[in-house]
Amino acid sequence: MKTPISFTSLLLLSTSFALSTTTAPQFQCTPSPTLPHQSIDIAILGGGASGTFSAIHLQNKHANQTLALIEAKPKLGGQVNTYHDPSTGLTAEYGVNQYTDVPGAAEFLDALGIPYTRSGTRGGDRGGGSGYIDIQNGRILDGPSEEEGNETAKAIRVYREILGRYPELEEGFLLPEPVPEDLVLPFTELARKYGIERAVLPLSTGMGDLDSVPTLYVMKHYGTHVYRNRFLYTARKNNQEIYDKAQQLLGESALLSSKPLAIQRNENNNSVQICLQTPTGTQLLHAKRLLVTIPPTLNSLKGTGLDLTPEETALFANFSRIGYYSTLVHIPGFLPFLSFQQNSTDKKNNITVLENTYPANSFNLPQLPAIWNIHRTSIPDLYHIEYGTATPLSEDIVKQNIFTDLARLRNTGLIITIDNGSGTDVQEDPVVVRFADHSPFYPYLSPEAIKDGFYKRLAKLQGERGTWWTGGAFHVPDSSLLWRFSEGVVAGLVKSIEEGG
């Protein structure tokens, strides 16, 4: 019988292997003649929620620190996706929908001059009722009975009581020692332990395979901040305007459509060199500090040319990735969402979201990869589909899977032909209007890694070789909570410059 190897042993082995076989590649950069070298105080890698907030916060609170915000896409925003419909002038959010109303969130919007509303319920086009659909078998399911609804409410109450035992999760991965067994149990096992099976489906979106994902990550994502039921919404129903305004304020400090080719950090004086590919050529940046906000998976980081240390490589290699895809699909004749006629009177259908369930599963969870939810938007015949996988898939495969699911719904009569206005019924195929890949949505660890002190080692990376870290893997993929967390990281970064030059 083989002797099991602990996570700690694996880390030591991988570190030893890296030390014995890897040497840091020599930094090479050939700048374009027309792009002069640029020296700044802080280089920020990634223009999503964490990176953009950090740049604006530095500009507002530490104006003496020069910065460059480096973003590979042509605009800031990360997982914010706002669609502007040219026909109706309406918008549909298919990324971040709302902002948790925690201290600092409203102040950030105020600093940008973005009007917002406060609400205790989901805003915009997400109001209304929910229904249930079994996509695998192409049928609409009856909603829960009163008794079943009460059981679900009770299960959520028990979940919240368990969640309340760990208030430190609101601030990051400050885990008790030893790590409580409940936090590392796969969430479906925790549900069985406490008899809260009915809480699993409502807490499943975005969480991957809950037969393997530890409870810790469910509690982080569906944490106390969610149940306070206080959220902020942009008044103009346009989340992208937050990041467009930030881009405007940052001006030339925001380097869009730009990608690092190589990043070298000098451990002697904490300085950083970045060879950057920009739309106008290759540029060399010199920075005193580096703030990394992109997902710290090996695939993501190696794509930047970052000179990873053996410790960084050993740690980041342990992250598993969840696939999360957000699409807008034009689906004429989607019967469950259509208004209907009763007693010669038009009745408005109040269903705005269908949750995919699979009754053959003890938790009613769909078998991944699968559609999690289908939301009706305010734009006629346009639906927001959330799709999940246990591990990331290609865009082509996800789209094909969605089309296969929709074809099944058409075959069972849930997508119908419609009158084209001339008295002739027409069958229109679904069309993907927008597609966003939010993978890796929430990098997570095995129970063994969590118990063996992974997050303490991760926290020790802050400030090493002039590099600071923030983003969802260091806290939770919630914009407002990341803004608050990043403020603390930036404070430490600025202090290191002031004390060490």
Image (spheres, rainbow, N blue to C red):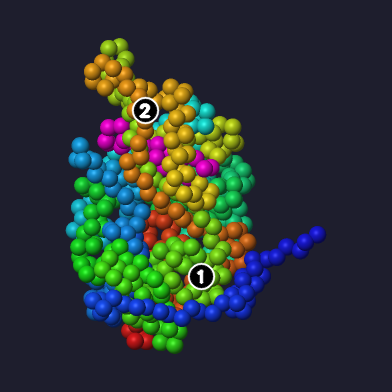
Is residue 118 inside the magenta stretch?
no
Instruction: Say few, some or many: other residues with alpha carbon within 10 Å of mark 2 (under 14 / 14 to 19 / 20 or more).
Output: many
State the extent of the magenta-drawn residues as a range.
368-388
- Answer with left or right where residue 148 lies relative to residue 422: right
Residue under label 1, please give it.
Answer: 458
Does 1 appear above or below 61? above
Within the image, what quadrant is residue 28 found in?
bottom left
- Answer with left or right where residue 389 lies relative to residue 19: left
Residue under label 2, please give it.
Answer: 334
The residue at the point 43 percent across, 71 percent down is: 305
Q: Decide if residue 316 is in sight here.
A: yes
Q: Tell me which amino acid carries mark 1.
A: Leu
Q: Position of residue 330 (x, y in %)?
A: 33, 35
- Answer with left or right where residue 147 lies relative to residue 62: right
Is residue 386 inside the magenta stretch?
yes
Q: Position of residue 225 (x, y in %)?
A: 40, 53
The residue at the point 73 percent across, 63 percent down is: 4
Q: Position of residue 196 (x, y in %)?
A: 56, 42
Q: Decide if residue 486 is in sight here.
A: no
